Amino acid sequence: MASGVGNIRNNRLAYLYTMPAFIVMGIVVIYPFLYNIVLSFSNMNLTHFYDWRLTGPQNYVKVFQERTFWYFFFKTILWTVINVFFHVTIGVFLALILNKDLKAKSFFRTLLILPWAVPQYITALTWRGMFNSEYGAISLIIHKIFGVQIPWLTTEWGAFTACVVTNVWLGFPFMMVIALGGLQSIPDELYEAAEIDGASWRHKLKNITIPLLKPVMIPAITLGIIWTFNNFNIVWLVSNGGEPADTTHILVSWVYKSGFRYFRMGYAAAFSMIIFLILLIFSWNFIKKSKATETVY
């Protein structure tokens, strides 16, 4: 106890400097998080907005009992897997190309980062316009080449596909930049030694590139999964709030609509806590099992 007090006295200047950051974090992160937990056990909604009271775990039970949760959970998993697969595949493929001695490499690198640099809402609304079944560029091109008109935004899976395409276009530059940084940190001597031993391109990829990229890519993939799982903007803007008939939702967009359009505050708070726990458990196990934080050298 005495040593703890002495430690605080000795480092009081450091605590003083960091105090504003802790206060801001407490106001903008910790308090809203704790308030959300309290709301998740309450009956707060449009009819009990001011006179809400704690009702126990009823909201959590209701979330798991509703078919809506399981259906949107399935769509969220599908949405996340498809997007992250294409983000990583396209990103690593382009990074491998850009890591070679190409002419105008800086130009192509800048060009490929552009989708990431454009604000999401501009990209989402632009792609929504291109998916318009009557006037959109994509629909017109497909109609001209194949003679078919696809109702992208007026059917459930058409709108879902439009959201996926938009998000793939937005997401691959991040993985490309991370993979390119990882590739440039691999010593050339390893490849030269492998070439002397007669290793093929496939063997170098399997035994040098992938193992040394792993510590860089696993945290990036983990972040990519969390961002994609919680990507509200694209789904909401491209599908115009989950159209048609609230079928084009993932979990986070449904939480938003439940809370701020249907004013089911307690239900939405419980829903959001379940999403938080899903991502927390997944991230913890994914990083632990992949051993991404262990050194490879």
Image: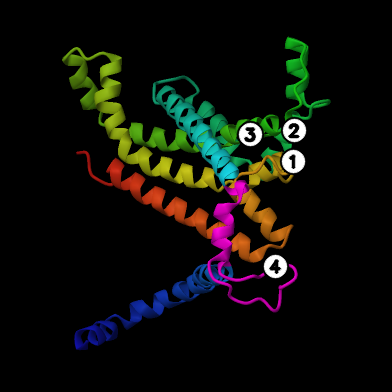
Q: Residue 14: say if magenta.
A: no
**Disc number placed over residue 243 in the picture, else none:** 1
Separation of disc 3 and disc 1 at Cα? 16 Å
Rendered-image quadrant of the N terminus:
bottom left
Mark 3: few, some, or many residues within 10 Å (few <14, many ≥20)? many
Q: Is residue 205 left or right of residue 265?
A: left
Q: Which residue is drawn at 83% across and 25% down?
A: 134
Q: Which residue is drawn at 71% across and 73% down?
A: 49
Q: Earlier in the sequence, mark 3 or mark 2?
A: 2
The local secondary structure at tag 4 comes to loop
Which residue does the numbered mark 2 point to in the structure image?
Answer: 153
Mark 4: few, some, or many residues within 10 Å (few <14, many ≥20)? some
Q: Which of marks 1 and 4 is nearer the N terminus?
A: 4
Q: Are marks 3 and 1 in contact (CB under 8 Å)?
A: no
The amino acid type found where label 2 is placed reads Leu
Q: Do the residues labelled 1 and 2 touch (CB within 8 Å)?
A: yes
Which residue does the numbered mark 4 point to in the structure image?
Answer: 45
